[in-house]
Image: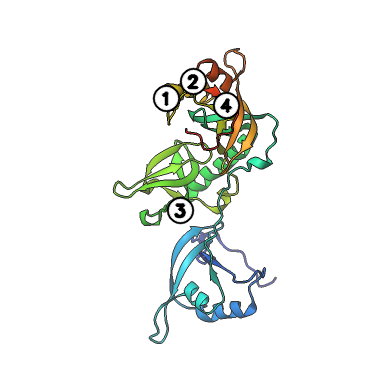
Amino acid sequence: MNEIYRLEDRFRELSWQAFACGLAYTGSPTNDTIWPEKTRELCRILAESRTGWINIVLLLEQGAALVKLIIQGEHNGGNYNFRDMLIKLGHVELSTKKMEPAPIDMESLTRSRLEVFILRVESPLLFWVRLKHNDQDLQEMEEELTFRKGRRSAFLICYPNDITMHMDVAVKEGNGWRRGWVDKISRPSNMVRMRLGDYGWSIWRPMNEIYRLEDRFRELSWQAFACGLAYTGSPTNDTTWPEKTRELCRILAEGRIGWINIILPLEQGATLVKLIIKGEHNEANFSFRDLLIKLGHVELSTKHKTTQKI
């Protein structure tokens, strides 16, 4: 302890210059929970104290990153890819797994009534909702995301060539930040369409406004999920819903509070439901399907149509 000294403030201005890295898309060929000593020793021999070049693939917490690493050869030897060399020698294997927010598991939700906010409505068989009891979790996550991006956004910007389909990203919306994934890329116009996974909406943004989503913001499931009205069909044989029906659905339901009962979970976090919409201005609550039937826009169907038109 008598060799420990205080550090003066003047020497705190420079950031810590060392940061931790790991090889991106790299996994163990075994199920061992720790790396074998032979692999660890080989890594030290191949890389420690050498000069190299990194490409940052994914920024993690506390200034760490997953990277691609090229090591400069010695004694006129050629440069080499650290990961590829370890794969060639049988010590690691290529892994394409990454951490992603998952859809809400419909099977795990109660079949009792669930309060929801109706985010977006396209038709009687396609609308997006969010569970009201998860509002606090979403708000806290977005507040942390906004705070984090305010401090580190310059280090998390996506370069156009790095943007890929289905990539999890973040974008600024008003005074805050929201997360989502890339679902369309227009390289001629340098634009990206991003699906906001917590809101059910898609938005277009220039490529230079798209930012990487850090792992800490992938833990919460996507909060928006798609629904359709159970036991509901079209009174006509048209292959798409008439615009009048779609517009009526938006007027009746979009932006409203309601309650769903899950009838039949589908794939990718979607479900067929019964939906009761909360009345406004002292109006009574009403069944979304029953009102559409009364107005002649849908009809009762006794079959689950899981591939019905939207």
Instruction: Determine crowd level at label 1: few under 14, some 14-19, many 20+ residues with C-alpha closer than 10 A.
Output: few
Looking at the image, is 243 positioned above or below residue 149? above
Where residue 309 appears, x then y in whole percent?
Answer: 47, 33
Query: Mark 2 or mark 1, which has the lower sequence index?
Result: 1
Question: Do the residues bearing badges 2 and 3 touch, measured as CB atoms within 8 Å?
Answer: no
Of tags 4 and 2, which is closer to the observer? 4
Instruction: Give the x, y percent position of residue 98.
Output: 54, 57
What amino acid type should be assigned to the residue bearing mark 3? Leu
Q: What is the C-alpha distance between the residues marked 3 and 1? A: 43 Å
Residue bearing mark 1: 242
The residue sitting at 46% across, 67% down in the picture is 68
Q: Earlier in the sequence, mark 3 or mark 1?
A: 3
**What is the distance, in whole Å, between disc 2 and disc 3 at their CAs?**
48 Å
For label 3, the SS is helix
Dot 4 or dot 3: first in sequence order is 3
Q: Is residue 32 left or right of residue 190?
A: right
For the residue carrying disc 4, how many other residues have a C-alpha within 10 Å: few (<14), some (14-19), or many (20+)? Answer: few
Give the secondary structure at mark 2: loop
Type of residue at label 2?
Answer: His
Using a 10 Å C-alpha cutoff, classify the residue at mark 2 as few (fewer than 14 neighbours), some (14 to 19) or many (20 or more). Answer: many
Give me the C-alpha separation between circle 4 and circle 2. Answer: 13 Å
Q: Is residue 71 left or right of residue 299?
A: left
Residue identified by numbered label 4: 301
**Image spot of residue 139 (x, y percent):** 58, 37
Q: CA distance from mark 4 to mark 3?
A: 49 Å
Q: Can you tell which quarter of the image residue 116 is in? A: top right
Quarter of the figure with residue 173: top left
- For badge 1, the amino acid type reads Pro
Instruction: Report the Cα–Cα distance between label 4 and label 1.
Output: 18 Å
Q: Are marks 2 and 1 in contact (CB under 8 Å)?
A: yes
Spot occupied by residue 179 in the image (x, y as percentages of width and height): 50, 44
